[in-house]
Image: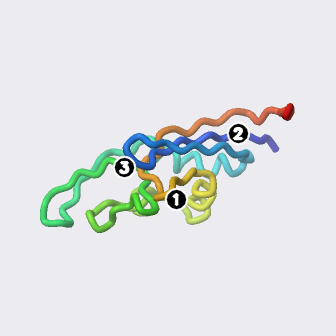
């Protein structure tokens, strides 16, 4: 089975980015692709939880960055996928000290053999 390298960059706060680089098998990649497609098609939305209208523009709020008290939706509320698919992707996503709010980019490439020099 083919293996890939997946690189995910996420925004934690005011353009403070965290990056993860992981190995992923082809079958797991096929499972998470539809969820990633949904994230890439994310549209801002409005809520009126606090008595005034708020616009939400974060596509993957988790941890302390998630503001459900302000009407923000969690990834499981925004996207349709099985729990297994969410768990596969969540294991690959980097997390800042206080969580993240936006997945900025996800790239894959065939896994290459690497030689460690030091």
The picture quadrant where one finds residue 49 is bottom left
Q: 56 or 78, which lies in front? A: 56
Mark 2 crowd level (few <14, some 14–19, many ≥20, 10 Å Cα): some
Give the Cα distance between marks 1 and 2: 22 Å
Quadrant housing the C terminus = top right
54 horizontally vs 37: left or right: left
Label 1, secondary structure: give it: loop
Looking at the image, is mark 1 or mark 2 nearer the viewer?
2
CA neighbours of label 3 inside 10 A, class few (<14), some (14 to 19), many (20+): many
Badge 2 element: strand
Q: Is residue 7 above or below residue 54?
A: above
Q: Nearer the viewer, residue 82 or 116?
A: 116
Establish if 114 lies above or below 68.
above
Work out whether mark 3 precedes mark 1 in sequence or the reverse, and give the earlier one: 3
Q: Which residue is mark 2?
A: 5
Q: Residue at x 18, y 62 (%)?
A: 48
Question: Real-space Cα distance between discs 3 and 1?
Answer: 18 Å
Q: Please state the horizontal and vertical placement of residue 51, each as a whole percent of the image.
A: 13, 65
Q: Which residue is mark 3?
A: 58
Q: Position of residue 71 (x, y in %)?
A: 27, 63
Q: Alpha-carbon distance for marks 2 and 3?
A: 25 Å
Pointers 3 and 1 in contact (CB under 8 A)? Answer: no
x, y percentage for residue 83? 56, 65
> Could you tell me which residue is drawn at 41 percent across and 62 percent down?
64
**Which label is found at residue 9?**
none
Q: Furthest residue to the left? A: 51
Q: Are marks 1 and 2 in contact (CB under 8 Å)?
A: no
- Residue placed under numbered mark 1 in the picture: 81
- Residue at 71%, 47% in the rendered image: 24
């Amino acid at each position: 089975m083919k293996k890939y390298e997946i690189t995910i960059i996420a925004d934690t706060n005011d353009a403070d980015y965290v990056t993860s680089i992981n190995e992923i098998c082809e079958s797991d990649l096929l499972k998470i692709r539809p969820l990633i497609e949904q994230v890439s098609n994310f549209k801002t939305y409005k809520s009126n939880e606090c008595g005034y209208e708020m616009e939400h523009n974060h596509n993957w709020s988790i941890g302390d960055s998630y503001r459900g008290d302000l009407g923000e939706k969690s990834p499981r509320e925004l996207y349709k996928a099985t729990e297994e698919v969410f768990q596969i992707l969540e294991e690959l996503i980097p997390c800042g000290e206080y969580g993240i709010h936006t997945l900025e980019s996800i790239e894959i490439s065939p896994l290459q053999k690497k030689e460690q020099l030091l």
